[in-house]
Image (cartoon, rainbow, N blue to C red):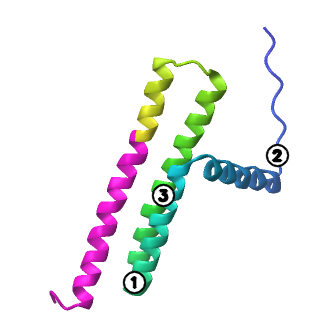
């Protein structure tokens, strides 16, 4: 069997255009992405009001990015599963459940880290501890 033809190299502008299109598709197709995006906006607002320091910003941004990335990967899995078959398949169902579990784990971890960080900041601002 002959080997498939190699894919042509894409220029950087094409790669970025495809990535932006992927973000649009991921955001557009998932209602749960908007829930995560809303929570990110709430965290950013709370962090700005509490005047978190640069290190705390980095930690919060990293947590938010991990959750949004997990949601994008889950959206990619769902899209691929729809492309493979429209019929129920236990293996695909398991894959989709695992993808959803990854989003859940990332969300719980981010919520714990964000809560600890912002509660500590709130305690410091209100002088609950010194």
Tell me the SS state at disc 1: loop
The part of the chain drawn in magenta is: 101-130
Tell me, for residue 35, which label it has, or none: 3
What predominant SS class does the magenta segment belong to?
A: helix
Q: Above or below — where is 83 with respect to 70?
A: above
Q: Above or below — where is 13 with respect to 105?
A: below
Decide if residue 103 is in sight here.
yes
Tell me, for residue 43, which label it has, or none: none
- Residue 18: percent from left, percent from top: 75, 49
Tell me the SS state at disc 2: loop
Q: Residue at x 35, y 48 (%)?
A: 105
The residue mark sitting in front, 1 or 2, is: 1
- Residue 108: percent from left, percent from top: 33, 54
The residue mark sitting in front, 3 or 1, is: 3
Residue under pointer 2 = 10
Circle 2 packing at 10 Å, graded few (<14), some (14-19), many (20+), is few
Q: Above or below — where is 86 with respect to 104?
A: above
Indicate the quadrant containing the N terminus: top left, top right, bottom left or bottom right. top right
Image-based side of 48 in relation to 85, left or right:
left
Residue under pointer 1 = 53
Nearer the N terminus, badge 2 or badge 3? Answer: 2
Q: Quote the CA–CA distance across marks 1 and 2.
A: 40 Å
Circle 3 packing at 10 Å, graded few (<14), some (14-19), many (20+), is few
Circle 1 packing at 10 Å, graded few (<14), some (14-19), many (20+), is few
Tell me the SS state at disc 3: helix
State the image quarter where residue 111 is shown.
bottom left
Q: Above or below — where is 28 with respect to 62?
A: above
Nearer the N terminus, badge 3 or badge 1? Answer: 3
């Amino acid at each position: 069997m002959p080997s498939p033809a190699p894919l042509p190299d894409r220029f950087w502008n094409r790669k970025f255009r495809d990535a932006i299109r992927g973000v649009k598709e991921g955001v557009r197709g998932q209602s749960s992405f908007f829930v995560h995006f809303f929570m990110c906006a709430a965290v950013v607002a709370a962090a700005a009001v509490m005047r978190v320091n640069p290190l705390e910003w980095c930690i919060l941004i990293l947590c938010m990015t991990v959750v949004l990335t997990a949601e994008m990967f889950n959206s990619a899995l769902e899209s691929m599963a729809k492309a493979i078959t429209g019929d129920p398949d236990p293996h695909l169902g398991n894959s989709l459940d695992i993808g959803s579990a990854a989003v859940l784990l990332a969300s719980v971890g981010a919520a714990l880290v964000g809560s600890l960080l912002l509660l500590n900041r709130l305690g410091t601002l209100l002088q609950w501890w010194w």
